[in-house]
Image (spheres, grey):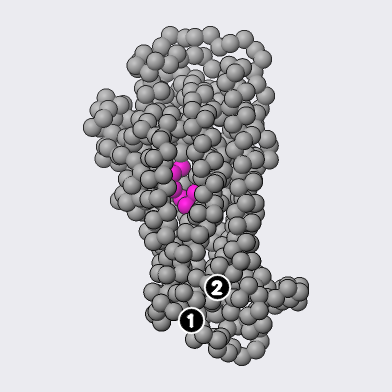
Amino acid sequence: MKRPVKRLLLILAFAACALCTGAAIKPATPHDAAAELPQAPSSGPASQPQQNTPGAASTGREVKNVTEYTLPPTLWRKAHRLGQIFFWGALIGTLYSWLILLLILKWRLAPKYRDWAEKASQVKFLQAAVFAPLLLLTVALLTIPLDVAQHWISRRFGLSIQSWGSWSWDWAKQEIFLLVAGTFLVWILYSVIRRSPRRWWFYFWLISLPLMAFLVFVQPVVVDPMFHTFVPLEQKDPALVTRLEDLVHHAGQNIPPNRMYWMDAGAKTTELNAYVTGIGASQRIVVWNTTIRAMDAPQIVFVVGHEMGHYVLHHIWKGMAVGAVGLFILFYLIFWMIGPLLRRPGGWPRALRRAETTEAPRRSPGTGMASRHTEIATRWEIRSVGDWASLPAFLLLVSVLSFIATPIASAVSRYFEHQADQYGLEVTHGVTPDSGEVAAQSFEILGEVDLSDPRPNPVDVFLFYSHPPIPDRIRFALTYAPWSNGRNPQFVK
């Protein structure tokens, strides 16, 4: 039940970060950040235990031979119920967010905030500094029930151990960051609209590209440390770093230990994860301490091998390229749709035929700017597309169009994750005995701890899964072995 408006603000403000940051090994679950979010339970005999591999004793978790994704009956029902809750919660949360934006338009809150901003100053940036926080905070407060519900469910199912006080502080820090970033973004957007009413979508897209790269660069060094503690992995587990260096050398890559980080996720969650984030000097591999505690050394080596796949195959850069294309289409569609949306009732079909009026632009009352859409002044008290008060309409269009594009973004992400799984299997072959079985064990532990739904709704997978389902990943791990037929691996020669 990720709050759509919050995510969409980030998409509007520097683009499709779900594809660009945090490509993780963790299974797709709808409570994850990027629209992530099925198979029958096993009826066969329980898996037989095998001898513990080195390091397994320290985890306290029995290592088993894995033939498919299996959970004990009680845990199976719990995981399936949680998956359904989050799936329907994601759909309901999306509709709720649309309703909130429509109510903000109907209640004329944005025109009130605009009037306050214009009374406060004639300077456009100062107007943005008054208007944007008021509107964005209104949206945040009206949609906070979604955030509260998500955290309550995570606590109820044992995925979160974060207290409500700690959660509230994280929520506040997140909102402060969004308000600051959103204010600058809103100021830039409307400055571009006022300077170029007919080409603003293209110029704003051009501006969004370096902003997107900047956000991806600063996220691991500025944003992430606001919420978690990061320590170089070699300070926490030098023995593991030694094994990872062997893996890196086997792959013929150069990923120094100072690009590997340990994250104290266990202070807030029981879930497991690892991911690659950042670009250039900020690019790094991050392993959660919960993952290190739950898995033995060979399993962690596979996890990091998967993350190396994202690193080596340049998935962050490719994701940014996909995001840039998506933004180009998004802004262009918004350009054609925003005017008709703001026009008075009954004007949509006629206006949709041509978004740009051929009338000479004239000054909108009280705005000091040229308006292309002179006939929209009577709807929702919004003067023009370039009026501050049109922001809720922008957010609504971003939300609807982004939801429509969700299956595409999810499919691209699943493809990247599948490639990373394949790379992890290839790079650990010859380093870890029976590497396919070890990878399957990693996914089994991951699914058990994170309560991955063993039989989710296919629509859930189509819309929200950013990773392949755990059963599919286990089957692939157990069957992918090109070397057994004398074929060469695709990525690690």
Give left or right: position of 450 versus 407. left
Q: Nearer the viewer, residue 433 or 209?
A: 209
- Which of the two labelled residues, at mark 1 and mark 2, occupies the earlier sequence position? 2
What residue is shown at x 62% (from left), y 39% (from top)?
87
Is there any visible trace of residue 405 in the rendered image? no
Residue tagged by mark 2?
111
Q: Residue furthest left?
A: 235
Residue type indicated by callout 1: Arg
User: Residues under labels 1 and 2: Cα distance?
Assistant: 21 Å
Q: Is residue 119 visible?
A: yes
Please name the residue shown 47% across and 59% down the image: 137
Q: Residue at x 41, y 23 (%)?
A: 294
SS at badge 2 = helix
For residue 427, what is the image quadrant?
top left
Q: Which residues are magenta?
A: 15-23
Task: List x then y, in percent, for residue 392.
Answer: 57, 65
Nearest the viewer among 275 and 191 is: 191
Q: Residue 477: image x %, image y %?
A: 53, 26
Instruction: Residue type at mark 2: give it.
Output: Pro
Q: Quadrant of the C terminus?
A: top left
> Left of 299 or right of it: where is 37?
right
Of 113 and 128, which appears nearest the observer? 113
Which residue sits at x=50%, y=76%? 115
The quadrant in which the N terminus is found is top right
Residue 21 in magenta? Answer: yes
Q: Which residue is mark 1?
A: 195
